[in-house]
Image: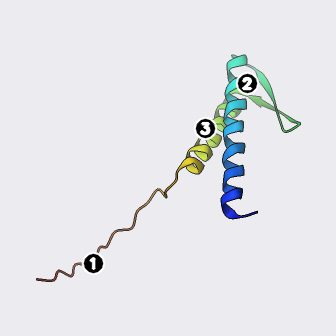
Amino acid sequence: MTSSETRESRRIFSEKMVADLEEALDETTAGVTQVTIDGNTVSYNRNQLLTELEFWRKQADRLNRSKGRFTTMKLDNSHEY
């Protein structure tokens, strides 16, 4: 698998995680919530669920960028007159 294919599969998975966690968050208002992802069931309390959701949103945003977050700039002070 090439790096672009790996990145694409990670992007798809992170977006699926965001959707599943948001759905679980909408279904419950308090207490323990169970989320099933890829056949694995995980129990979260509301605070843990919000923390996981924030993590996966950041992952999805990071993987959806087509360019890096930073740019390179020439910082030397040489001026040619």
Q: Quadrant of residue 39?
A: top right
Label 3 crowd (10 A; few <14 / some 14-19 / many >=20): some
Q: CA distance from mark 2 to mark 1?
A: 52 Å
Q: Secondary structure at mark 3?
A: helix
Q: Earlier in the sequence, mark 3 or mark 1?
A: 3
Q: Residue at 34% across / 68% down in the picture? A: 73
How far is disc 3 from disc 2 in space, using C-alphas?
14 Å
Sequence-wise, which precedes: disc 2 or disc 1?
2
- Give the amino acid type for the residue marked by disc 2 in the picture: Ala
| Residue 61: quadrant of the picture | top right
The numbered dot on residue 54 is 3
Distance, label 3 to label 1, CA atoms, is 39 Å
Q: For this rendering, which residue is in front, 26 or 63?
A: 63
Tell me, yes or no, whether the two marked residues, 2 and 1, touch with CB atoms within 8 Å: no
Residue at 70% of width from left, 34% of height from top?
48
Q: Which residue position is annotated with label 1?
A: 76
Residue 30 in the image, given as x and y percentages of width and height: 71, 18
